[in-house]
Amino acid sequence: MVGAGGTLGREVTARLAARGADIVALGRDGLDITDARAVERAVADHRPQAVVNCAAWTAVDDAEAQEAAAARINADGPRNLARACAASGARLLHVSTDYVFGGAPEDFGTPYGELATPAPHTAYGRTKLAGERAALAELPHATTVVRTAWLYGRSASGTATTGFVGTMARIARHEERTVDVVDDQHGQPTWAGDLADRLVALGGLPLERSTGIFHGTGGGHTTWYALARAVFQLVGADPERVRRIDSGQLVRAARRPAWSVLGHDGWAKAGLPPLRHWRAALTEALTDAAADPKTPVAEAR
């Protein structure tokens, strides 16, 4: 398990541990995936049946000015892991992103399928696409790529929620201010626990059913604005405190995709259902994480 200290890595590690699996969970300090020799030694020493790669450069805006540095982690890292897996006979499960697609306005309305042509418009997306392609080229018959988006999960303490959802929940519960959120970017909120379940399930399937590309995102789709309102409602705060704005009112180094909705047809190959609808997952996530037990959790509408 690489990237074990992150939101998704913790969830995958916990699920494997619950199954009694023999796990080597390595965070950033435990293995530098940009160091090919270190990766080769680690895989050779531990001889895993599978390597799950949750390590990534995820600072989307910073990548615009530091693309080479991002590429070392997002592109060279997966290549190093795939080569080491190929040498040892292990399989690789690699987590990627919706940013491999451009999200152009002309794509609006049609989910990107697993085999849709990527066209990243950001440095982050380019480096992640390069990582996908490198892993699949080095280990074509034993690499599983799972693209995800709008990921949130439990904090390390388990008492709060991370990501955009966590930020909105904190503001809703503990601050009185209003918040401005964009309503012209469409995507799929994804609970890390749900994605971890699918990664573990894929890792237990025969290779002929589980290699290739899958889209691990929540069902349905929404906007950041509507997601924020749902969070406010679920924790018992007034959703009218969330104000609608458009992307032109925010200045960011990396352009966010207007349409970031992925299709899920690939799960039929594995014999697994797609992830559940984002609203159902959000309700459970905020209930489980309940940072403030006095705050009621309502049903999202």
Image (spheres, rainbow, N blue to C red):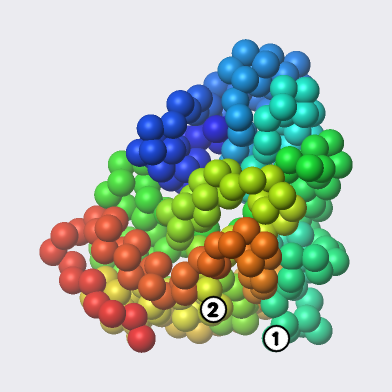
Asked whether residue 137 appears in the rendered view, the answer is yes
Which quarter of the picture shows residue 289?
A: bottom left
Q: Residue at x 76, y 60 (%)?
A: 100
Task: Rate crowding at label 2 as few (under 14), some (14 to 19) or many (20 or more) other CA atoms within 10 Å.
Answer: some
**Residue under label 2:** 220
Q: Residue at x 74, y 37 (%)?
A: 78
**x, y percentage for residue 193?**
43, 54
Task: Rate crowding at label 1 as few (under 14), some (14 to 19) or many (20 or more) other CA atoms within 10 Å.
Answer: few
Residue type of the residue flagged with mark 2: Gly
Q: CA distance from mark 1 to mark 2?
A: 12 Å
Q: Residue at x 64, y 67 (%)?
A: 268
State the residue in front, 19 or 184. Answer: 19
**x, y percentage for residue 237?**
26, 76
Residue type of the residue flagged with mark 1: Gly
State the residue in front, 36 or 175. Answer: 36
**Residue under label 1:** 109
**Is residue 228 placed above or below 30 in the rendered structure?**
below
**x, y percentage for residue 290?**
24, 59
Residue 106 in the figure: left or right of residue 289? right
Residue 120 in the figure: left or right of residue 235? right
